[in-house]
């Protein structure tokens, strides 16, 4: 894996083919399908049928929803307790010295999720199969069909819990901004389309976490007429426009963002910062925001301030 910062996080098909019969290697197929369902967003379908139609020889099938998620929770795919996860790994034959290789014949994130869970519980001897099932098949490597062949139980124990996640309080402290610099080429749609996407994004975030703080629009220097007008139209939409998600007037806005950059010059081989332009852009943004009295108490985040 030349050029990859953490090559140990991936394993190549050549290596796996050469080490399939090693008692110290366990291969876990994590295939899962999410089937759209308007009633509950999606149905979870474990990929057991895919597995039995063809899998890497010796692999075990992991039901990501039932085997390695806390099924006592109302939300799906919640992290298990350390004891629950350790018991699941032992059932799959994983020990404390086992090299665990995960793959998926569907989206790769199921393989990376299992990899993450192993790291969460202190087992670093794990990797994702580079190229996954698709690459294994393209290379015409050996394939097994039918249910998994049981392995002897492992001695996996959780050596540490790293808590590689954050809780509700941490998320509530974040500022959620949609997009960045929508007034230039990063955004291909119209301002109206941006406003519509903002409405739906804000509604979704607030639905998931009512106390979350959402804002925007993260436009470029307000002294530029195009950027200044973009900021104005966004604030006008938030104040008095029709919310595309709710049909009501206005949309949630908990903070306002824009950029205020400088204009550095090179003089006699030295870089001279453009602080006056920085201040001009900041002031122009303040003036635009001040023209909307209803937002006078909102925080203003100057999210880029290169001098």
Image (spheres, rainbow, N blue to C red):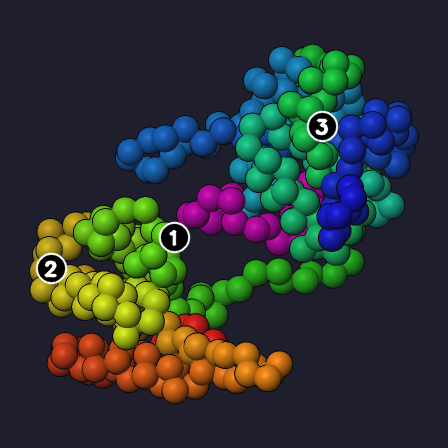
Mark toward the viewer: 2 or 3: 2
96, above or below 302, in the image:
above
User: For residue 191, what is the image quadrant?
Assistant: bottom left
- What residue is rendered at 23% in x and 49% in y? 190
| Magenta segment | 71-90
Reply yes or no: does residue 73 show up in magenta.
yes
- Which residue is tagged 2? 241
Near mark 1 (Cα within 10 A), the count class, few <14, some 14-19 or many ≥20, is few
Give residue 232's position: percent from left, percent from top.
Answer: 19, 68
36, above or below 192, in the image:
above
Q: Judge by depth and name the residue closer to the eye, 134 or 154.
A: 134
- Which residue is tagged 3? 60
Helix, strand or loop at label 2? It is: loop
- What residue is rendered at 74% in x and 14% in y? 140
- What residue is rendered at 14% in x and 66% in y? 236
- What residue is rendered at 41% in x and 28% in y? 35
Disc 1 and disc 3: Cα gap in Å? 44 Å
Q: Quadrant of the N terminus?
A: top right
| Rendered image: mark on residue 186 | 1
Q: Earlier in the sequence, mark 2 or mark 3?
A: 3
Q: Earlier in the sequence, mark 1 or mark 3?
A: 3
Outermost residue to the front: 268
Task: Report whether 72 appears left or right of 1.
Answer: left
| Rendered image: mark on residue 109 | none
Q: Judge by depth and name the residue closer to the eye, 107 or 65.
A: 107
Near mark 3 (Cα within 10 A), the count class, few <14, some 14-19 or many ≥20, is many
Disc 2 and disc 3: Cα gap in Å? 54 Å
């Amino acid at each position: 894996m030349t050029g990859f910062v953490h090559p140990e996080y991936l394993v190549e098909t050549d290596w796996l083919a050469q080490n399939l019969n090693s008692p110290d290697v366990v291969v876990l197929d994590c295939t899962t399908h999410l089937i759209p369902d308007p009633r509950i967003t999606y149905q979870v379908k474990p990929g057991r049928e895919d597995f039995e139609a063809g899998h890497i020889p010796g692999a075990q099938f992991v039901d990501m929803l039932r085997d390695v998620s806390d099924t006592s929770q109302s939300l799906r795919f919640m992290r298990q307790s350390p004891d629950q996860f350790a018991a699941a790994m032992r059932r799959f034959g994983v020990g404390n010295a086992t090299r665990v290789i995960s793959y998926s014949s569907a989206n790769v994130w199921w393989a990376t999720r299992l990899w993450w869970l192993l790291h969460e519980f202190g087992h670093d001897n794990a990797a994702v199969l580079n190229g996954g099932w698709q690459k294994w098949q393209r290379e015409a490597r050996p394939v097994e069909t039918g249910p998994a062949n049981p392995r002897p139980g492992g001695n996996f124990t959780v050596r540490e819990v790293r808590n590689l996640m954050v809780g509700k309080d941490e998320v509530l402290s974040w500022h959620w901004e949609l997009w960045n610099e929508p007034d230039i080429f990063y955004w291909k749609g119209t301002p109206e389309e941006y406003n519509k996407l903002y409405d739906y994004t804000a509604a979704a975030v607030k639905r998931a976490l009512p106390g979350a703080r959402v804002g925007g629009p993260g436009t470029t220097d307000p002294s530029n007429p195009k950027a200044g007008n973009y900021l104005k139209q966004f604030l006008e939409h938030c104040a008095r426009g029709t919310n595309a998600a709710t049909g009501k007037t206005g949309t949630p806005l908990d903070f306002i963002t824009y950029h205020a950059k400088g204009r550095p010059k090179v003089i006699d081989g030295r870089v001279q910062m453009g602080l006056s332009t920085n201040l001009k852009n900041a002031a122009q943004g303040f003036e635009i925001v001040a023209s909307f009295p209803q937002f006078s108490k909102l925080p203003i985040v100057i999210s880029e301030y290169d001098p």
